[in-house]
């Protein structure tokens, strides 16, 4: 049995990676470049309200600087989704891998929409801080500067630079954190929804069959010798006959990645690996399906050749990523200022724990992430289902039950008399659906309780509970189907052979309760969901009695694409029976 090695607090401090036995070990390579930097000011404080950047980096205490001199890195990884999670997870692994291997793996990070984060990172030479939250207030030594991101790009504004990166044979990996919504999958088939307005608009963009200009632009960061506009070249890689806007006109990451692969095939033709880091079952296969569907539906003259090239030159490994990264607060920013002595406009915070499990199926060179504890396995399914059904499933259950009970954060829910019991009971119930070869479910549940209880993590239930129609089918419904199918046809005379699902039914009832429309037209507890109008409509036109509530539950399951579960009378009855108590704010962890 393989066990992914979780990284504890020492793993986030340069020079003290966690070894296999949990003890701190010396770094494989001394941190380069620090001797050339200015010495730290006394006490680490920098007067005058200085801002984080290359100019002030040398005045920060050496142990709080990046694990590698960021000026030694090159953009060899492209990442789509310049949010907090990537900067607290994959970017940390990449930086430590570069430091410990001596290989110059840097990241060109692309923001699909937000110009603010691009501008803020460029203003700081793409440096930012990562803080491990271990209590109510992080200690100064829990904060360090991260330097793996070497370019911050806007997906449309910097389309030309992105084309050149895709055309560069030294770029061997593209990673993504774009959330489930970013894949534009149809809920019934999991394939690309070509009728979605943004996807349809991207499919109308023609890319011709042109080749990008030869050569790679000089290395450099936006804001350090190159103007922000130096990377903007929307026409790069496009033929004269391409539709107006070319790749700069693409709005979806799926379309942008597909176009990037076209640019690569038409230029260097080197293999490349696309790595989904989003919380979806079989995320590699999901990414491959939507990208291939986009190419197939396009009007590109060489789309058949592109699909054939992708079949042999592009890999889509599945992965599991894990680190709780809550929204950064003003208190966090103040703690960073106190710890580093500089202001950081884009700090990120997260729990000490982090994990990355990857299918060992790459088509091109990659960072040696295993040097920082990432685990490469032939099959990620056991780990994937464990995380989806135990961690993510418990998170969603806590979100909806906690909201009903008036809680605000995960830690609030764990502080109740039912929170810890819910996590353990739900994990025990779902454990029977997990394949062999993954983490031990009992030990995993113990870790979850410890992590969820962390008072330094202000993980909002409203955030976790949003987009429930996209999340809970994978987190709960497949487990429900497996458990209920295992007892189909079981003789009722043998109660011991019956598998009950009280925790999943309670969780499903709590979600149903949270879909009730609020007075302002949104969802009851402030969550958001792309299916909110359809979910809200399920409550209308039915009487407020047991029969009406049962009809509502069936309708809600129908919106989730779970018509089979909607026909399960015992399940619907169990969910319906719990709704009155939840509506009154009562959480009852008992069998029905």
Image: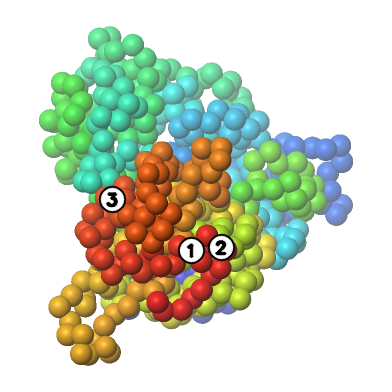
Residue 558: mark: 3
How crowded is the residue under tag 1: few (<14 C-alpha within 10 Å), some, or many (20+)? some
Quadrant of the image for the N terminus? bottom left
At mark 3, the secondary structure is helix
Q: How is the image coloured?
A: rainbow
Q: Are marks 2 and 1 in contact (CB under 8 Å)?
A: yes
- Residue 244 percent location from the top left of the image: 33, 11
What is the spatial separation of the Cα atoms under label 2 and label 1, in whole angstroms? Answer: 6 Å
* Image vertical order of residue 449 relative to residue 543, above or below: below
Nearer mark to the viewer, of 1 and 3: 1
Q: Are marks 1 and 3 in contact (CB under 8 Å)?
A: no
Nearer mark to the viewer, of 2 and 3: 2
Residue drawn at x 21%, y 78% is 487
Sequence-wise, the earlier of marks 1 and 3 is 3
Residue drawn at x 68%, y 38% is 345
Q: Quadrant of residue 410?
A: bottom right
Q: Residue furthest top?
A: 240
At mark 1, the secondary structure is helix
Residue corresponding to mark 2: 584
Residue corresponding to mark 1: 580
Note whether residue 406 is visible.
yes
Residue drawn at x 26%, y 35% is 193
């Amino acid at each position: 049995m393989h066990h992914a090695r979780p990284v504890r607090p020492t793993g986030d401090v340069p020079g003290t990676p966690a070894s296999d036995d949990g003890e701190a070990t010396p770094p494989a390579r001394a941190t380069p470049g620090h001797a050339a930097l200015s010495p730290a000011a006394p006490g680490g404080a920098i007067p005058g309200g200085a801002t984080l950047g290359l100019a002030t980096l040398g005045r920060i205490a050496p142990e709080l600087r990046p694990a590698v001199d960021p000026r030694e890195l090159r953009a060899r990884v492209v990442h789509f989704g310049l949010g907090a999670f990537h900067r607290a997870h994959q970017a940390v692994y990449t930086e430590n891998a570069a430091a410990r291997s001596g290989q110059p793996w840097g990241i060109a990070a692309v923001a699909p929409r937000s110009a603010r984060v691009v501008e803020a990172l460029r203003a700081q030479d793409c440096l930012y801080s990562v803080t491990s939250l271990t209590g109510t207030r992080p200690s100064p030594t829990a904060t360090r500067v991260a330097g793996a991101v070497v370019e911050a790009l806007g997906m449309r504004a910097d389309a030309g630079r992105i084309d050149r990166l895709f055309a560069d044979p030294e770029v061997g990996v593209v990673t993504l954190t774009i959330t489930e919504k970013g894949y534009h999958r149809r809920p019934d088939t999991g394939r690309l929804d070509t009728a979605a307005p943004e996807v349809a608009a991207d499919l109308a963009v023609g890319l011709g069959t042109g080749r990008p200009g030869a050569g790679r632009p000089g290395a450099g960061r936006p804001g350090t010798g190159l103007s922000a506009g130096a990377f903007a070249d929307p026409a790069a890689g496009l033929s004269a006959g391409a539709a107006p806007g070319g790749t700069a006109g693409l709005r979806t990451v799926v379309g942008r990645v597909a176009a990037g692969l076209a640019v690569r095939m038409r230029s260097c033709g080197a293999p490349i690996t696309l790595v989904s880091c989003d919380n979806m079952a079989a995320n590699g296969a999901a990414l491959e399906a939507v990208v291939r569907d986009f190419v197939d539906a396009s009007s590109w003259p060489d789309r058949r050749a592109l699909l054939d090239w992708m079949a042999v030159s592009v890999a889509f490994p599945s992965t599991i990523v894990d680190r709780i990264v809550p929204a950064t607060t003003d208190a966090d920013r103040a703690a960073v200022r106190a710890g580093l002595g500089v202001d950081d406009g884009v700090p990120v915070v997260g729990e000490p724990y982090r994990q990355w499990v990857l299918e060992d199926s790459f088509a091109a060179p990659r960072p040696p992430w295993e040097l920082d504890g990432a685990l490469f396995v032939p099959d990620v399914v056991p780990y994937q289902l464990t995380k989806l059904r135990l961690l993510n499933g418990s998170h969603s259950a806590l979100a909806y039950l906690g909201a009903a009970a008036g809680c605000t954060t995960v830690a609030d829910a764990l502080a109740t008399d039912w929170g810890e019991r819910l996590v353990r009971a739900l994990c025990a119930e779902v454990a029977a659906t997990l394949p062999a070869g993954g983490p031990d479910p009992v030990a995993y549940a113990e870790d979850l309780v410890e992590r969820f209880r962390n008072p330094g993590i202000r993980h909002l239930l409203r955030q976790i509970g949003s987009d429930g129609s996209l999340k809970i089918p994978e987190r709960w419904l497949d487990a429900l189907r497996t458990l209920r199918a295992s007892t189909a046809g079981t003789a009722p005379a043998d109660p011991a052979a019956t598998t009950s699902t009280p925790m999943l039914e309670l969780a499903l009832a709590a979600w149903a309760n949270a879909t009730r429309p609020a007075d302002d037209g949104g969802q009851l507890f402030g969550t958001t969901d792309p299916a909110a109008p359809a979910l809200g409509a399920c409550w209308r036109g039915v009487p407020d009695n047991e029969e009406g509530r049962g009809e509502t539950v069936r309708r809600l399951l129908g919106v989730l694409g779970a018509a089979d579960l909607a026909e399960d009378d015992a399940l619907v009855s169990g969910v319906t029976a719990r709704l009155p108590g939840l509506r009154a704010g009562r959480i009852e962890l008992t069998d029905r």
